[in-house]
């Protein structure tokens, strides 16, 4: 039965997102966890990204019914990003972020872990960071932080994550630069304005995924968008409206 479910899940994820969502709602969430984990490691872009989206939704439903089971899933993401796991953790930051996006309690308990991946390790007695060095993982992490910022910018601002994101605007990896710009724009990070200005001529094109849709967007377009959001935030602050 498990093999049958896995095969069907992979078929659905390779097709239309709305159809996959509708059919997966008929399955018990516990039984979908392993098939969705396996989908995160697939090379097919559509399949993998739609797995990220639906995993977040499934995880939120699971958390409503069985919070401890949802915590186990989140701990699996975290373990996969640990050097000791022997794996790489493909898809884990994105899927973790989707769970945090969709569920208040998962956000409360795990947003600090997601943000720890942009923080450098501290001295042994003050370990507060789990910095991800691989640019391919940084792409997913920054995409995930931006995804959370769409709904929970206030939470991220309380955690003071914006200063740690500035470093990524000068990354050698253009996708990392793009997603860092997006995250900082959504946060209205006024301290990023000068660095964002420097990306306005960056013509590298990113295949950007958002809720079932892929769009070709240049780094410059991400930066321009972010600058508008930052400038709107500055105007709001000048009017005494404060931050989000």
Image (spheres, rainbow, N blue to C red):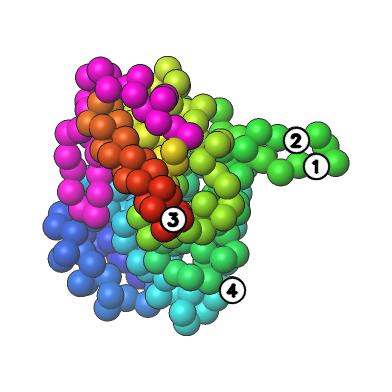
Of the residues under marks 2 and 4, which one precedes in the sequence? 4
Q: Residue at x 15, y 66 (%)?
A: 19
Of residue 167 and residue 130, the one placed in the foreground of this image is: 167
Q: Is residue 6 visible?
A: no
**Which residue is under mark 4?**
68
Left or right: 54 as drawn, with respect to 80: left
Q: Which mark is residue 122?
A: 2
Dot 2 falls on a residue whose secondary structure is loop
Q: Secondary structure at mark 3?
A: loop
- Of residue 196 and residue 132, the one placed in the foreground of this image is 196
Q: Are marks 2 and 1 in contact (CB under 8 Å)?
A: yes
Q: Is residue 203 magenta?
A: yes
Left or right, residue 213 beside residue 226: left
Question: To which residue does mark 3 refer?
Answer: 240
Between the residue at mark 3 and the residue at mark 2, the CA separation in whole angstroms equals 36 Å
Residue appearing at x 56%, y 55% in the figure: 158
- The label shown at residue 48 is none
In primary-sequence order, the first of circles 3 and 4 is: 4
Image coords of residue 214 (percent x, y): 18, 43
N-term mark: 3 or 1 = 1
Residue 104, x across and y down, in percent? 48, 70
**Disc 1 on helix, strand or loop?**
helix
- Tell me the mark number nearer the camera, choosing from 3 and 4: 3
Residue shown at 47% from the left, 82% from the top: 65
User: In the drawing, does residue 12 fall left or right of residue 5?
Assistant: left
Q: Which residues are magenta?
A: 191-218
User: What residue is shown with label 1?
Assistant: 126
């Amino acid at each position: 039965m498990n093999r049958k479910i896995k095969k069907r899940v992979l078929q659905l994820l390779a097709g239309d997102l709305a159809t996959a969502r509708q059919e997966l709602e008929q399955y018990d969430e516990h039984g979908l966890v392993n098939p969705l984990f396996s989908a995160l490691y697939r090379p097919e872009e559509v399949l993998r990204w739609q797995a990220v989206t639906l995993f977040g939704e499934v995880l939120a439903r699971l958390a409503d019914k069985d919070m401890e089971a949802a915590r186990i899933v989140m701990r699996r993401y975290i373990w996969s990003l640990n050097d000791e796991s022997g794996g790489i953790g493909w898809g884990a930051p994105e899927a973790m972020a989707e769970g945090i996006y969709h569920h208040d309690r998962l956000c409360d308990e795990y947003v600090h872990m997601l943000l720890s991946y942009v923080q450098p390790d501290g001295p042994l007695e003050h370990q507060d960071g789990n910095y991800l060095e691989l640019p391919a993982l940084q792409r997913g992490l920054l995409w995930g932080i931006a995804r959370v910022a769409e709904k929970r910018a206030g939470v991220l601002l309380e955690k003071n994550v914006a200063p740690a994101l500035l470093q990524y605007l000068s990354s050698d990896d253009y996708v990392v630069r793009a997603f860092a710009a997006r995250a900082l724009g959504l946060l209205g990070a006024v301290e990023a304005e000068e660095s964002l200005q420097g990306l306005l001529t960056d013509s590298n094109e990113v295949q950007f995924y958002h809720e079932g849709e892929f769009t070709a967007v240049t780094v410059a377009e991400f930066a321009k968008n972010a600058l508008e959001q930052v400038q709107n935030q500055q105007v709001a602050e000048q009017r005494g409206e404060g931050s989000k």
